[in-house]
Image (cartoon, helix red, strand yellow):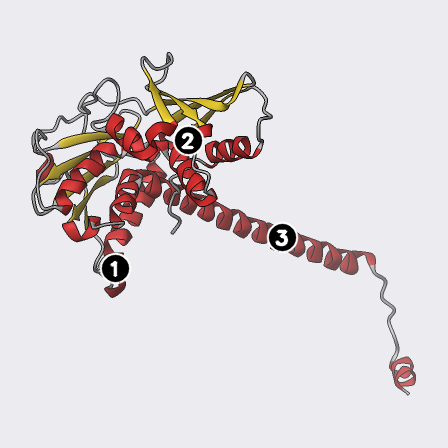
Amino acid sequence: MILLQSPSRFLLQILQDRVLSGEKGIDIDCHTVEFDDVRYHIQFSMRNPKVMVLSVALPLPPPEAILYDGLPLGAIEAIKAAYGPVVQILDPPKDGFDLTMKINLTKLPLDEEQRNAILTQIASIREVVLGAPLKLLLKHLASKAVAPNVDKLVALVHRPNESFFLAPQADKVTIVYPMRFQDSIDIVLATSFLQEFVEARRTAALNNVPSCMWSPAPPLELKGVSADALNANAGFVTFVVYPRHVEGKKLDRTVWNLLTFHAYVSYHVKCSEGFMHTRMRRRVESLIQALDQAKSDAEKLKKLVHGGSFKRLSLKNEVDSRF
């Protein structure tokens, strides 16, 4: 299984190249898109080559998701905590974007390892912003408490017009994903994949990971949620996260894995579909080759039968030919 990486490789490469370029630089004005329709607008100017303006557009939120000034709960605080004086949030953001930041590369640490760590963190802006409310709730779980002023069921956006749901409690947090797939083949593959995913959890090597359940019907935690929000075409996956899963350094990894779970499943469903199509094409090609070979052999036999000449030998000629 392949896990998705948090940093945007395109964004990270631009940042590293600009840091290594010294005082030299060229104007940069480019757009890039990540999975789940997270869009970036990257701008550098020759007048100030060490300052980057980065604008981020998040997935279109569904009606049930609650945002604060267009951003998830705790996103501003998470940005300030992650980047400190290196990043300045511009208000209002550029048109068509949810967040615009000015990144001053001259304020990066001189130590190469620390500098690369912050650049990687900047390239992971998606995780910092979208994962902020999830991280806030799981931090309280680590201390076995419930975050104040939080509803019993929290809807968090992770895909365009789609949410996943959290039911926080003091001793555990239940996370439910409505798994939506439009293609009928994807639905069948996703259902099989999710069933195997749940079965794999029962192996001895994975008995410490969050418990996982799959159901074609909405679980009890989603009672009262609108039918539109629960329009799932493959089923519902439920994780139960306990304090031991978010202790210390486990927190960031758990946040990212939960935030991108649907993309993780979608990726492997598409890979499985591509693999099966490749196998089918190879099988068809082998059958065509066998058929062509059979036709060729039949043509040779036909020519031998109809095109050859035969000489009738007498008994004496046959005996002479043998001796």
Q: CA distance from mark 2 to mark 1?
A: 30 Å
Taking depth in this image into account, of 281 and 314 the one nearest to the observer is: 281
**Secondary structure category for the residue under label 1:** helix
Judge the density around disc 2: few (<14), some (14-19), many (≥20) Cα neighbours within 10 Å: few
- The residue carrying mark 1 is 206
Residue 309 on image: x %, y %? 86, 62
Identify which amino acid the numbered label 3 is placed on.
Gln
Precedes in sequence: disc 2 or disc 3: 2
- Residue 137, position as x, y percentages in the image: 16, 37
Q: Earlier in the sequence, mark 1 or mark 3?
A: 1
Q: Badge 3: how crowded within 10 Å, few (<14), some, or many (20+)?
A: few
Task: Identify the image quadrant of residue 123.
Answer: top left
Say which amino acid is labelled 2. Answer: Glu
Total numbered labels placed on residues in the image: 3
Judge from the rendering whether residue 168 lies leftward or rightward of residue 22; answer left or right. left
Q: Which residue is mark 2?
A: 34
Work out which quarter of the rendered image holds the C terminus and state it.
Answer: bottom right
SS label for mark 3: helix
Q: Do labels 2 and 3 touch, CB within 8 Å?
A: no
Q: At x 47% / y 35%, what residue is drawn?
A: 12
Mark 2 secondary-structure assignment: strand
In the image, residue 100 above or below residue 303: above
Q: What is the x, y in percent for residue 258?
A: 26, 42
